[in-house]
Image (spheres, rainbow, N blue to C red):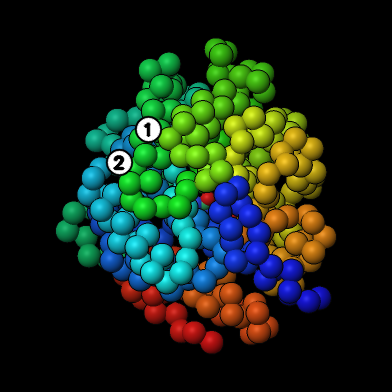
Amino acid sequence: MSIDPLFSPVMLGTLELPNRIVMAPLTRARATEAHVPTALMARYYAQRADCGLIVSEATAVDPLGMGWFRAPGIWTAEMVDGWRLVTDAVHAAGGRIFAQLWHMGRLVLPDYIGGELPIGPSPIAGEGETFAPRPAGDTSLFLPMKPYVVPRQMNEEDIARVVASYGSGADNALAAGFDGVEIHGANGYIIDQFLQSKTNQRTDAYGGSLANRIRLLREILEVVTSRVAPGRVGLRISPTSARKGMGDEDPGALAEMIGEVAADSGIAYVHLIEPIASGFVDKPEHPVMTRLRTKFTGAIIQNGSFDGDTAAEFIANGQADAISFGRPYIANPDLVDRIRTGVPFAPANFDYAYVGEERGYTDYPLS
Ligand SMILES: Cc1cc2nc3c(=O)[nH]c(=O)nc-3n(C[C@H](O)[C@H](O)[C@H](O)COP(=O)(O)O)c2cc1C
């Protein structure tokens, strides 16, 4: 299979990408403990700037939605200044970068928010455990783990605050020099918690029917596209993923509804996590891409367990407009060149995926 299809330019809304290789969002936890992006992060992203588009690691829009030690936020002027280091470095290296706007909802541990309960659509805990903050004085590299807790059910005021924080996050992303924003509607975070039937058991206008479960996403799309031109907005979704206790009664219908709402908003792309082999998430038994496509005619970025050959095949067949790579980008800053020249991908050291400084982050060699 020729890899040429990956090296033709493509329009993503109003942004032209020189190739079809996208760096998927990867939380790497190298911001400060106050969630401010750093010069080290700027170096890491600049090393990877030859892809068609970088989607930043998930970036919290509100302190109540932040539950990850040293992940970045975008709700203060200092955070905006930190992100400016990153966007300047990526642009100087000839690249393009969108900010992934994030709110973790029920998956925030109380340890991150002054002991309060996190907020979620319904009082149902996420499944499993997550990283707790490093206790003061602890010098170990590795973080303690704690189970997710039962969240407080959100009222209308909570919902309005989340929607507004996506608006201010979008404003701040532009102020920080990002080329656009990606709304994080995937992986069991707050938007996904409202979308999927297992985690949304509300009986008000935000729960029950699919039309109600999608209301939060619709409102977030409205506020974000009122701040950032729709041609520079994307949406990431994972309607078939069951990680962290997610589940939906009919992911195909959900994907079709998301496609309709995304089309109404005029956004540039939908970034669908639908792996072609089980890996970070399981390969779905019933893929939903076709259902999404029946309603959404903008660009599609597909993600999940691709290599150069399978990515090129999907582009050549018209199954996607671009392919994003997640885990391969950890250890391969020169992923674009490796795909172009057929050099195998280097394996990542996952011990340093979510902790550390330069090691396992900016020190991977070129091929
Ligand atoms: C270390 C790590 C961090 C991740 N962080 C994010 C994130 O911040 N936002 C997001 O939407 N997905 C995140 N993901 C999921 C990836 O973007 C991607 O969907 C996943 O790795 C599957 O793609 P791959 O098979 O190319 O690795 C993360 C995955 C890994 C391994």
Q: Which mark is residue 75?
A: 2
Element marked by disc 1:
helix
In the rendered image, residue 154, in percent from the top left (x then y), is placed at 43, 21
In the rendered image, residue 247, in percent from the top left (x then y), is placed at 65, 36
Label 1: how many Cα within 10 Å (few below 14, some 14–19, many 20+)? many
- Ligand 1 located in image quadrant: bottom right
Q: Is residue 144 visible?
A: no
Element marked by disc 2:
loop
Residue at image coords 79%, 37%:
294
Q: Amino acid at mark 2?
A: Trp
The N terminus appears in which quarter of the rendering?
A: bottom right
Q: Is residue 268 visible?
A: yes
Q: How many marks?
A: 2
Hey, which quadrant is residue 157 in on the image?
Answer: top left
Whether the residues at callouts 2 and 1 have beta carbons within 8 Å, the answer is yes
Marks 2 and 1, the one that precedes in the sequence: 2
**3D distance between C-alphas at marks 2 and 1:** 8 Å
Hey, which quadrant is residue 42 in on the image?
Answer: bottom left
Vertical relation: 251 (above or below) 8? above
The verdict on label 1 being within 8 Å of ligand 1 is: no
The C terminus appears in which quarter of the rendering?
A: bottom right
Q: Nearer the viewer, residue 316 or 236?
A: 316
Residue at image coords 79%, 56%:
318
Q: Amino acid at mark 1?
A: Ser
Q: Which mark is residue 133?
A: none
In the rendered image, residue 266, in percent from the top left (x then y), is placed at 61, 36
The verdict on label 2 being within 8 Å of ligand 1 is: no
Residue labelled with disc 1: 165
Vertical relation: 16 (above or below) 340? above
Residue at image coords 61%, 19%:
212
Residue at image coords 74%, 49%:
284
